[in-house]
Amino acid sequence: MTRRRFGAAVGAAMVGLPYASGIRAEEPAGPPLDAIRTRHQLPGLVAGVVERDGLADAVTAGVRRQGGDAAFSVDDRIHLGSCTKAFTATLAALLVADGRIAWGATVGSTLAAEPVISRGWRDVTLEELLRHRGGAPEKAPPAAWREAWECGKPAHECREAFVRRLLADDPPERRGEHHYSNQGYAIAGRMLETVADRPYEALLGERLLVPLGITSAGFGPPSALQPDAPVGHDGAGKPDDADNPAAIAPAGTLHMTVADWARFLAVHLGGPLPEALAALAPLLPDLQRPSPTPPGEALGWVTARRPWGGRVLNHAGSNTRWYCVAWLAPERGFGVVAAANQGGAAATKGCDDACAALIAARRG
């Protein structure tokens, strides 16, 4: 097991649970991280505390690959799965600040160049998509999903084709109701790259990741950029580095180190913003404002109240080969994160136990 303390600002088929299971501060601190990892039979586990100036403390346990000897390190890249959504919503806020798009911008007006947009999609707004209330399908249509998997073109071209498929038919869900949808975030990402005339991946890097000093980010499994990086494992613990198709990158294919993830999370804790992101400050309340009806989702987050944190922000992410979770308490100026290089229920429980231990230790 390794531990490191940090100073300020340290340099459908395969998508898992959207939100975490609901840890509470009353839970006991529990055993050390390696005991948590062993109890849940996980290959590797990392957990850390985030403050307004970045990652304050982190600890790892286990190995990069089941049966291997290479230790899981704090410096290793982790897959963020659906925790990518908070990045996408924050990127949207930057483009809103630029005046390039508005929260109320519609699919019909933004993607007007598409040859066919069904009537049911035309008035759906960017904000509705980011809140999972635009009527987007919880699961992609089989033909569209198959084509996304088979697409060998650049990511933005695959996304364009995927979104075109989605928009050709009316939204399958009732607009205004909450239906968690990766497809909705693919549409939102397509809207952003259309108004900026830049692929989503490049746009996210230029407008958000680079200004934050995030240097380890990439899309797909961490091993795509670093061959000796930790690999994912299925729920039974078998190594498997598959990932979601590039078409839904705005919904969940981002990876980076836990320290770089913390640089982003610090923004949502109210930390200092670099000059290039100063325009984001007045829009943070928009990003974090809960809807008036359950599940109280914000933009890229779900909100809740917890005794240990007051009003908190939460999201979990999984491509079923990795699992991660973040809990942020902006009112208290801290948060906790955990990630495992395995998917499934054991990873969910292990990460929840690790976060609960960190919260209890913080309170103690």
Image (tube, helix red, strand yellow):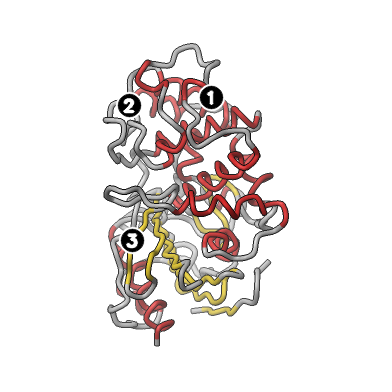
- Label 2 SS: helix
How many residues crowd around disc 3 within 10 Å: few (fewer than 14), some, or many (20 or more)?
some
The residue identified by callout 2 is 142
Q: Earlier in the sequence, mark 3 or mark 2?
A: 2
Near-viewer residue (177 or 218): 177
* Number of on-image labels: 3
The residue identified by callout 3 is 304
Q: CA distance from mark 1 to mark 2?
A: 26 Å
Tell me what residue is drawn at x 72 percent, y 56 percent. 275
Q: Amino acid at mark 1?
A: Thr
Relative image position of residue 110 (x, y in whole percent) = 53, 24
How many residues crowd around disc 2 within 10 Å: few (fewer than 14), some, or many (20 or more)?
few
The image's mark for residue 250 is: none
Furthest residue toward bottom? 364
The residue identified by callout 1 is 110
Q: Amino acid at mark 2?
A: Pro
Q: CA distance from mark 3 to mark 2?
A: 34 Å
Q: Amino acid at mark 3?
A: Ala
